[in-house]
Image (cartoon, helix red, strand yellow):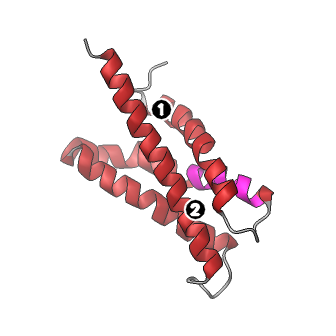
Amino acid sequence: MDLHNPWVFLVVGYLVTVALETPVLLAGLSRRHSVRTRLLAGAWLTACTYPVVVLVLPPLLRETWGEIPYLLVAETFAPVAECALFVWVFGTSGQWWNRSNVRDCAAIIAANGVSFLTGQLLYCFLAANTSG
């Protein structure tokens, strides 16, 4: 499997990301959301942002500015966009900063953090075990 191919990485990375983020969302999203909604969030939010992070941003940022600017933009874009989408669809209408919406956004940010850190650890592990 060629993980350097962005289309292969998109599919594999999406599945791994959903597997990592969904448990965090199940535990962290507000209790007013059903388990079905929380499971849906695990698949849907990543489906909305992951193609941008994997297919759109790398040629725009990584190839021009390098890895650090790419990671800063990608890892800011994903949770901000996911919070906005989730609150727009499932949030309490007219009240962006209520306790439930803040908890939901905190869970989304935490889920993204878990997948990012796991990805970085996996990348370091693979790089250390394939070099030389």
Q: Residue at horizontal 43%, vertical 44%?
A: 117
Residue at the spot of label 2: 107
Name the amino acid, label 2. Answer: Ala
Q: Residue at horizontal 54%, vertical 66%?
A: 106
User: Is residue 20 located in the magenta-colored stretch of the structure?
Assistant: no
Number of numbered discs visible in the structure rendering: 2
In the rendered view of the protein, which quadrant contains the C terminus?
A: top left
Q: Say if 97 sits above or below 76 in the image.
A: below
29 vs 55, left or right, is right
Real-space Cα distance between discs 2 and 1? Answer: 25 Å
User: Decide: marks 2, 1 in contact (CB < 8 A)?
Assistant: no
User: Is residue 39 located in the magenta-colored stretch of the structure?
Assistant: yes
Q: Say if 7 sits above or below 112 in the image.
A: above
- The image quarter in which residue 63 lies: top left
Q: Which segment did they paint magenta? A: 37-47
104 vs 70, left or right, is right
First in sequence, mark 2 or 1: give its number: 1
Q: Which element is circle 1 on?
A: helix
- The image shows residue 35 at horizontal and vertical percentages of 79, 57
Per the picture, the main secondary structure of the magenta-coloured stretch is: helix
User: Residue 57 bears which disc, if any?
Assistant: none
Q: Which element is circle 2 on?
A: helix
Q: Residues within 10 Å of mark 1 (few under 14, many from 20)?
A: some
Q: Residues within 10 Å of mark 2 (few under 14, many from 20)?
A: many
99 vs 51, left or right, is right
Q: Residue at horizontal 57%, vertical 36%?
A: 16
Q: Nearer the viewer, residue 58 or 72?
A: 72
- The image shows residue 33 at horizontal and vertical percentages of 75, 67
- The image shows residue 5 at horizontal and vertical percentages of 42, 27
In the orientation shown, which residue stands out farthest toward the left?
A: 65
Residue at the spot of label 1: 9
